[in-house]
Image (cartoon, grey):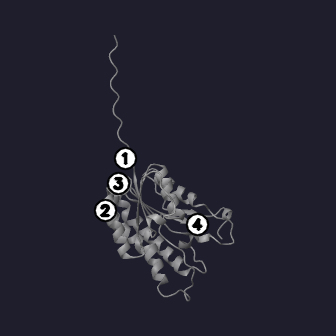
Amino acid sequence: MSSPSPAPASAKPVIPRIAVVTGVSRGIGREIARQLLEQGWEVFGCARRSREDLGWSDETGRLHYASADLATKEGCLGWVDFLNENCERVDMLVHNAGSFVPDTLLDAPDGQMEGQMSLHVYSAYRLSRALYPLLKKSERPYVFTLCSVASLRAYSGGASYCISKFALLGLTKMLRQEWIQEGIAVSAILPGAVYTDSWLGSPWPEERLMPPADVAAAVLHAYAASPRTVFEEILLRPFQGDL
């Protein structure tokens, strides 16, 4: 008579990874959040819009959203308070919040440069510093900054935007340099023209620009790499070149 088969070991519960993504109301940030949710992540997302005006719905119940104006110190601190109250750790931090404003060095209205720096650079600086303890609790912490080809090359008609994106790339390099020994991976994503709301009404057809989903896929691909590898800079351009 054969001995009874041992009872199957209970499967260990799958603990979802946790991502913090800024600027999730539209464009690249929305696609990053959507792809993470599809892969089972818990996503903490923010944007300036209210939850009612977010513009897209989450069917998974794993999107934790709060309205925050990251161009202000108060908005950053409020968002950090929300995260500290609701997050046990952060596995992925994506600095995506941003906007493009056309100007030149001489015609930029007073305060516009400061606004672009606050939104693109100071928000990433403040949030990275504040969320460092939560990143250190992760077994695979990773920080992504959504820079731009404008971080590498000056473009006429976008002075404040280009200067702030150059500065954001500099911040990213410093994070990478200082956090290597901390085990925190840091990558700069540098996309060219992506078909988002910023391009609505432009003469360029949608097919000429990159889809936001491709940029989001690059972020997830980098995170999936071995911890022995980091994608320091990921440059993406439309197939037919910059506009």
In percent of width and height, residue 58 lies at: 47, 55
In this figure, which residue is indicated by the disc labeled 4? 196
Going from the N terminus, do you reach mark 4 or mark 2 first? Answer: 2
Whole-percent x and y of residue 1?
34, 10
Residue at 33% x, 57% y is 87
Alpha carbon separation for disc pair 1 and 2: 19 Å
Which tag, 4 or 1, sits closer to the chain's start? 1
Give residue 186's position: percent from left, percent from top: 43, 62
Which kind of residue does numbered mark 4 sit on?
Thr
Q: Earlier in the sequence, mark 4 or mark 3?
A: 3
Q: Secondary structure at mark 1?
A: loop
Q: Residues within 10 Å of mark 2 (few under 14, many from 20)?
A: some
Of tags 4 and 3, the one toward the viewer is 4
- First-in-chain label (3 vs 2): 2
Residue displayed at 53% across by 77% down: 161
Secondary structure state at the residue bearing disc 2: helix
The crowd level at tag 1 (other Cα within 10 Å; few <14, some 14-19, many 20+) is few
Q: Residue 114 appears at what percent x and percent y?
A: 45, 82
Q: Which residue is mark 3?
A: 138
| Residue 176 picture quarter | bottom left
Q: Nearer the viewer, residue 34 or 223?
A: 34
At x 56%, y 58%, the residue is 213
Q: In the rendered structure, which amino acid carries the disc numbered 3? A: Ser
**What is the distance, in whole Å, between disc 4 and disc 2 at their CAs?**
31 Å
Which residue bears the numbered disc 1? 15
Q: Secondary structure at mark 4?
A: loop
| Residue 161: mark | none
- Name the one closer to the observer, 181 or 199: 199
Mark 2 lies on residue: 84
